[in-house]
Image (spheres, grey):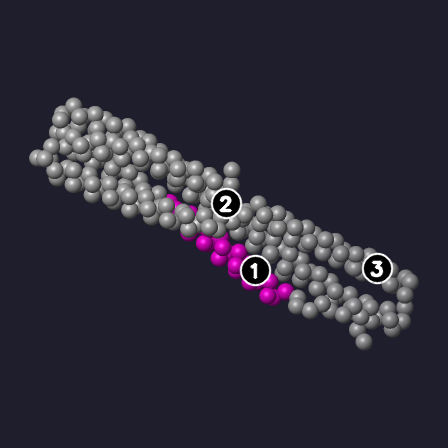
């Protein structure tokens, strides 16, 4: 299951649980006598707070789902750039003084010009390896890690919120039952579960913000690494000097 599908499924579960609590709240509201109208007002107030917080969570996540990212593709591209670096390193191994036969089989001005061009070629290859291949590979890998960490934080935050809601439903059911048994006298106890979920939603938003902060940090790091490629070679040296 990709991150978007998993997140949508978790949001559906949260919605289902919230609807279950709403039924309990409506049941309690129907049992509250006029003398305890302030309890009904407090219940509605806390429920409205909960809806606002859940709306913030929904809006925040829906916005992020529009650009989920593809860490698998980023890691694959990172590996490809690392492979490019490896190939360049092997090319450099073939143009060392020890690997060439110019000393034994070639002499004269042509040989001298060719030998003089070798060091710029080696430096160019080294730049492709260190300034480009390694840095681009590192930046892509960093970005992939950030995306994975971000969506993991989102999943953990939503699972934690679901856990809070599930536990709270038990309390809400007990409060509803007590309210029914006391003809509305126990209605104030219903406020506690709603407040608990509101607090859980606030904590969830904090966790989501922390995950976004981690992703932003990874993105800044990747951007800085890519910026270093500007120090690399921009024009390939001639193979021989005139």
Q: How far apart are marks 1 and 3 (CA)?
A: 35 Å
Instruction: Please state the total of marks drawn on the protein image.
Output: 3
- Give above or below for 92 relative to 28: below
Query: Which residue is label 1 attached to?
Result: 226
Q: Nearer the viewer, mark 1 or mark 2?
A: 2
Q: What element carries label 2?
A: helix
Asked if marks 1 and 3 touch (Cβ < 8 Å), the reply is no
Q: In which quarter of the image is the C terminus?
A: bottom right
Query: Which residue is label 2 attached to?
Result: 148
Asked if marks 3 and 2 touch (Cβ < 8 Å), the reply is no
Question: Around disc 3, counting alpha carbons within 10 Å, would you say few (fewer than 14), some (14 to 19), or many (20 or more)?
Answer: few
- Taking the view exactly as shown, the residue that stands out farthest to the front is 30
Q: Left of 193 or right of it: where is 124? A: right
| Residue drawn where x is 54% and y is 47% of the image | 70
Circle number at residue 165: none
* Boundaries of the magenta span: 207-232
**Residue 215 among magenta residues:** yes
Query: Which residue is label 3 attached to?
Result: 100
Question: Around disc 2, counting alpha carbons within 10 Å, would you say few (fewer than 14), some (14 to 19), or many (20 or more)?
Answer: some
Q: Quadrant of residue 239?
A: bottom right
Sequence order check: which comes first, mark 3 or mark 2?
A: 3
- Give above or below for 54 relative to 13: below
x, y (%) of residue 56?
Answer: 33, 48
| Residue drawn where x is 48% and y is 51% of the image | 67
Front position in the image: 142 or 54:
54
């Amino acid at each position: 299951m990709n991150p978007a599908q998993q997140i949508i499924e978790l949001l559906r579960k949260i919605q289902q649980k919230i609807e279950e609590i709403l039924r309990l709240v409506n049941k309690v509201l129907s049992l509250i006598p006029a003398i305890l109208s302030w309890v009904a007002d407090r219940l509605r107030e806390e429920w409205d707070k909960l809806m606002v917080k859940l709306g913030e969570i929904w809006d925040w996540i829906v916005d992020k789902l529009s650009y989920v990212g593809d860490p698998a593709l980023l890691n694959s591209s990172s590996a490809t750039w690392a492979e490019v670096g490896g190939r360049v390193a092997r090319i450099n191994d073939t143009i060392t003084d020890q690997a060439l036969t110019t000393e034994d089989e070639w002499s004269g001005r042509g040989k001298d010009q060719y030998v003089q061009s070798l060091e710029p070629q080696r430096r160019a290859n080294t730049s492709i390896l260190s300034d480009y291949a390694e840095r681009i590979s590192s930046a892509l890998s960093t970005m992939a890690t950030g995306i994975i960490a971000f969506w993991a934080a989102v999943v953990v935050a939503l699972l934690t919120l679901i856990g809070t809601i599930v536990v709270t439903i038990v309390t809400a059911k007990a409060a509803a039952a007590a309210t029914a048994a006391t003809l509305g006298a126990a209605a104030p106890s219903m406020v506690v579960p709603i407040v608990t979920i509101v607090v859980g939603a606030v904590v969830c938003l904090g966790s989501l913000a922390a995950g976004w902060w981690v992703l932003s940090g990874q993105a800044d790091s990747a951007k800085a690494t890519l910026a270093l490629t500007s120090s690399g070679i921009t024009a390939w040296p001639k193979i021989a000097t005139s």
